[in-house]
Each structure stands twice: as structure tokens, then as C-alpha cells.
Amino acid sequence: MAKQLSDKQRHFNALWIAETIRLQEEQQGILADNEAIRQAKVNGGDFQQRILTRAEWLADKTHLLIAQQGVINAHRWTIRILMLLTFFLGIGLVLPTFSSQNHTINIFSALGCLLGLNLVMMAVWLLGALLGGDSLNHLGKFILWLTSKLTGKQQIVQLLPALLMLFHQQRLERWWIGRVTNILWLSTSVIALVTLLVLLATQRYGFIWQTTILSSDSFVFIVQLLGAIPHVFGFPIPSEELIRQSGNGAVMLDTARQTWAAWLVGVLFVYGIFPRILFFILCTLLLRAGYRHLSLNLSFSGYALLRPRLMPDKEMVGIIDCKPDNWYEPMVVNGNWSEQGAAVVGLELEANSTWPPHLPKGVINAGRIETREQRKHLLDRLAATPVAKLLIICDPKRSVDRGTLNLISELACYVRVAKVALLVDEGVDTKRLADWQQALQRLQLAYDDLATLLTWLGDAND
């Protein structure tokens, strides 16, 4: 079962899609968006909401939504691959020191292996975050590169730049890369801790410190200083006597080994694992806080050009010009359109055609479509309140053309089931009838005679 997205994640994905569409149109020109504009106007909302509605419709038609999901999945696999690498890195931090043949561990070497690289990378990240580093570091660039390779979609060209532009608006790059960095190093440190515990549980190690330039007093101070915070969490601190004895050679008493081992585990937890947990939580909270303030930069020229079309000064409500002589007012039987209702509409009918046909009870007469205004009015109405079944009546005496087929296809998008009734009589040209039938087959729309489909239209159980 697909994981349900939160409202916050859906909103972020919608912003991401809109920004991607903007970049695409800047590079390749405006997309064919008449229907997308119509949908945005029908759904309403402020300017940004209409931009998001338009972008979602275009993304669905151009398979950009599928490409976006591909990028999201590829990013998840990238993180999984990096997490797998942390497994080997965590083991690699421990084995160089704890694989000695005499099972004597130099305390300085152990600290350097377990904490050295971790603390250096933590300091580098902290400096970058505190000094306002808004650009991606090498890890961030590698993550995006590997994500693009795993995706393999052409739309990746605009999707990833759009994502970075969206992040840059609230300067979220540092918190995104900080979140990834800290979870990777947290995983590395946990693996190192588990490896250390396994080795300490299965081997007998003695601990020794060796130095040329430092005095024993200095080492006593360092050990006690590093052990002060872990001692708050219950980890022991080696006594001064034990520390001085360990400078002459490894003290092989069980209590001495256990004390040094517990001190080393405590130092790794407090200085290697615990800060990474705190920084990961902090970056996550700051990233989520930034998500709440994300919006489109409506000052971009690509969005400014859409304003007159999405937010016109005067929007036509209904039809405001004079009614033509052949205009038929829709005769609504049950008052409201709904997804449980049924409607009938006439297209490409001769002027002397009888309208409306004798309709079953409860069927809406949507009229005959003769003008562009009538077409827009019907599409807007269907978009706002779609019906379950729609019967489109056509006269095959007229030649089938692309505009009519496009309208039939558009109408079918707004209803659950659409069928076409062809008015066949003795005056119908066989060739034109065949052209109509072939065209409807290409649209994958069912067609039949009018009497049969009127029965289907009024059947509440169908």
C-alpha cells in the first residue's frame, strides 16, 4: 500500500512541480495550457493556488508527476546506499586499533580512530552552517548526482534545479544537507559502538597510554576531563592511580580493563553519538519550520505572465451576449449536477434536428453546442459538478473533424462514463458513418443508436 503523504508534503511537492513547470517554460516555451487554465479558474483560490492547480494538470499530462515520484524514490535509494557505506565505515573506524595481535590498546589511538574524523567533520559542518553556507557541500552535490543517475528521467534536468531554487528561498539547503550529514555520521558512530562492544565482549584487551612530550599529569587531566560528562550518564572515570599505572604498561586486572572499556564507550557515546542526535533533531525541526513558510516567488516573470490569464480583471459568468436563434436553454430536471446524475448533449446536429429527444426521467438536458461560448459554459459546469453518465448525440451526416473529436474527448474526461449516439437514417453516407465509427474507436468511446443509449442513460442500476 502506498504511503499516504501529509498535507505539508503534498503542498511542498505541488510547489516543486510549479517551479519545475516554470523552468521548463522558460527554456522550451509556454505549454498548451488552455484546459489547465480552465481547471484553475474553476477550482478558484488565490493566484498561487491557481498556479499550483495549473501546474498539477500540466504535470499529469506530461508525466512530470511520475518523474517527480521517480526522483523521490531515487533519493531514498541514494540515502540507503550511503547508509550501507556507513556500515563499513563504522567497522573500519574500530578494526585498525582493536585488531592488534597482543590485544593491547593504545588509548590515544583508540580515541583518534573512534572520534577523530567524526569530530573534524562535525566542526566543518558547524562552521559552514553558522557562517551562512547556502551552497551545497561535496556530499550534497554527490547526493544529487547519484539521485540523477538512479532516476534516469529526462525531466530530471528541471526537477533538481527547481528543488534547489525552492530550498534557497528559505535557505533550507544547510538544514537539508545537515540532516543528511548528521544521520549518516550517527549511523557510522552507532555501527562503531556496536562493533566496539562486540570486540570488548569477545576479546580480552589491556589499555595503555604512551606519550613522548606529555607528562603523566597532563594525561590524568585529559582522561578526567573527557570522562566528566560521560560520568553524568553513569560511565566510570578511571582513578588517578589506574591512569598513572596504565602509562607504564597495560594493567591486566579485570576491574582495570572493565573501567577503561566503559570509559571509552562513554566517551564515544557522549562526544560521537549524542551530538549527532541533537544536530539531527535540530536540522529536522528547522527544515520543517522552513517548509511551513515556503511559497512561490510570484515576482518571477514566468508567473507574472500567467496573472492576466489566471486572475482576469473581468471573468465571464455564464453567457452575457445575445442569445442566438438556435440556442437551447439547458432544462435541468433534478436541479443539480452530481456524479450520480446523467446528462445528454448534442454536437454536430443539423439545424432541423428535433431537440431535445424524449429523455428518461431525471436526465439533464445540457443543450446543443453550437458556439464557443456554449462549449466553455458546458465544460466549466461539468468541471465544477461532473455527472456519472453523459450521452453525446452526433449526426454523422456531417463530416467528423478534429475540433469535434477534441471536444468529445474533453467532455469524456469529466464524467464516469461517456457514450456517443449516432443518428443513423437513410440519408447517412456510409463512408462518413465509417469515419465517425473509426474516430470513436480511436478515442475508445462506445457508440450505438439513440434508442439503445437513451435506455442506458435512464437505467439507474447501470
Image (cartoon, helix red, strand yellow):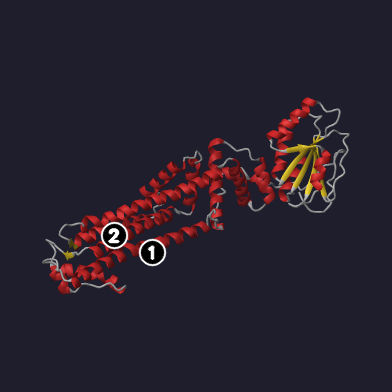
Q: Is residue 140 left or right of residue 365?
A: left
Q: Is residue 57 visible?
A: yes
Q: Which mark is residue 195?
A: 2
> Could you tell me residue 69's position as x and y percent?
52, 47
Q: Nearer the viewer, residue 390 or 166?
A: 390
Residue closer to the observer: 188 or 379:
188
> Which dot marks residue 406?
none
Q: Callout 1: 10 Å neighbours few (<14), some, many (20+)?
A: few
Q: CA distance from mark 1 to mark 2?
A: 23 Å
Which residue is drawn at the image coordinates 41% and 43% (left, top)? 145
Q: Which residue is mark 1?
A: 278
Name the quadrant containing residue 221. bottom left
Of marks 1 and 2, the one in the foreground: 2
- Vertical order, 322 against 124 (above or below): above
Residue 296 shows in this picture: no
Quadrant of the snapshot with the N terminus: bottom right
* Front residue of 340 and 46: 340
Q: Does residue 129 appear to the left or right of 457 in the view shown?
A: left
In the figure, 38 relative to 11: above or below? Answer: above
Mark 1 vs 2, N-terminal side = 2
What amino acid type is highlighted by mark number 2? Thr
Q: Which of these two is toward me, 220 or 197?
A: 197
Q: Is residue 108 above or below residue 406?
A: below
Q: Residue at x 46, y 47 (%)?
A: 74
Q: Residues within 10 Å of mark 2 (few under 14, many from 20)?
A: some
Q: What type is the residue that disc 1 sits on?
A: Leu
